[in-house]
Image: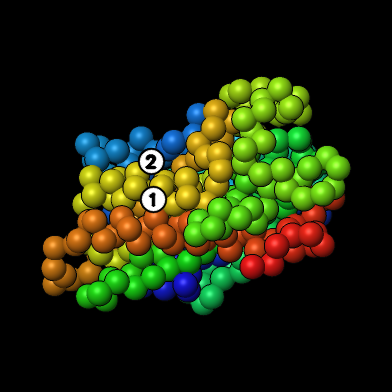
Amino acid sequence: MGSICDVPGIMVGHDTDEVGVTGCTVVLCEGGAVGGVDVRGAAPGTRETDLLRPENTVDQVHAVLLSGGSAFGLDAAGGVMRFLEERGVGFRAGAAVVPIVPAAVLFDLLIGDSRARPNAEAGFRACQAASSEPLGEGSVGAGTGAVVGRLYGRGLATKSGIGSASMRLDGGVTVGAIVAVNAVGDVVDPSSGQVLAGARRPDGSGFAGPDAYLQLSAAPALPPVGSGASTVIGVVATDASLDKAAATRLAQVAHDGIALAVRPAHTPLDGDAIFALSLRRERQSEPNLAALGVAAVRVVAEAIVRAVRAARGLGGVPAAAELEWTPRG
């Protein structure tokens, strides 16, 4: 299934703090990309999302930042801006160059060191590490402190991370996604519904399963609604030529990939946000928006699955691959 780096013009870099158990990931598109966004979670942490609305003026994005650190992690976008400004990349405003860097963050302050947050230097380092080569997945970058399955609190959650996937459509168009998975819910195999990572039963006998979330009284450890303690954040990119309205629509449809692979999804405790990037190609036929949407759903779901399968235990939270009873299918 490849990675988002299969989309020409995309580079990805991670900055990982294994001691503090946090990090950030940058998706660079220095040549500029048309951007869109859709935020579905009730507790988001974002930056520059209003700018991406179809009716607003600026239509070129130069990078997207995904970060741990909760709202503190938005500081890392400053480092991305500095990196791009030094390279002369950005929106021209007279003698000034202003890079456009939307961002979204996830809450990882309760794993590792709560005082460790990605800052501007972390964002700059992620840019320095960016490459179009196959990228690291699992507990790296923005996925370093990610966990899933918070029904019984962090002590019975499962380590997650960041994953990526891509696919090539007829006509040569590529669609790719990168997703950091820090959900309240469980991650399941979309084809079978089998739980791949999630809330572990208190008796140690296996995963509780999504139906356990119906027993709300059994979840006293869940934080209060609106705390923003969980989220799924990601980027979908394509080399199909889209305007801002179409890019926004692609971001909206891509959320179906979250609903396929995370159960429950889009809860009041999640800040789910998906960005969409279109790196336009010359002399291209009219894009097939229906096909792009199907592909976006598929690569987002696959990226989520890969995030938990590649994860490793950190901060005292085990990954699914480290649990003896975890299905290996």
Q: SS of the residue at dot 2? A: strand
Name which residue type carries label 2.
Answer: Asp
Asked whether 260 or 3 is in front, the reply is: 260
Residue 38 image label: 2
The quadrant in which residue 185 appears is top right
Upstream in sequence: badge 1 or badge 2: 2
Is residue 115 found left or right of 266 in the rendered image?
A: right
Tag nearer the camera, 1 or 2: 1
Residue 16 visible in the snapshot? no
Task: Please give the name of the residue rendered at 38% of the width and 41% of the height, measured from the top-left corner.
Answer: 38
The quadrant in which residue 264 appears is top right
Given contact means CB atoms under 8 Å apart, are the residues at marks 1 and 2 in contact? yes
Name which residue type carries label 1.
Answer: Ala
Is residue 241 found left or right of 277 in the rendered image?
A: left
> Residue 322: x percent and y percent?
80, 62
Residue 204 visible in the snapshot? yes
The residue that mark 1 highlights is 254
Residue 50 image label: none
> Residue 166: x percent and y percent?
43, 68
Considering only vertical position in the picture, is 117 above or below 229?
below
Task: Please give the name of the residue rendered at 60% of the width and 59% of the height, measured from the top-left corner.
Answer: 307
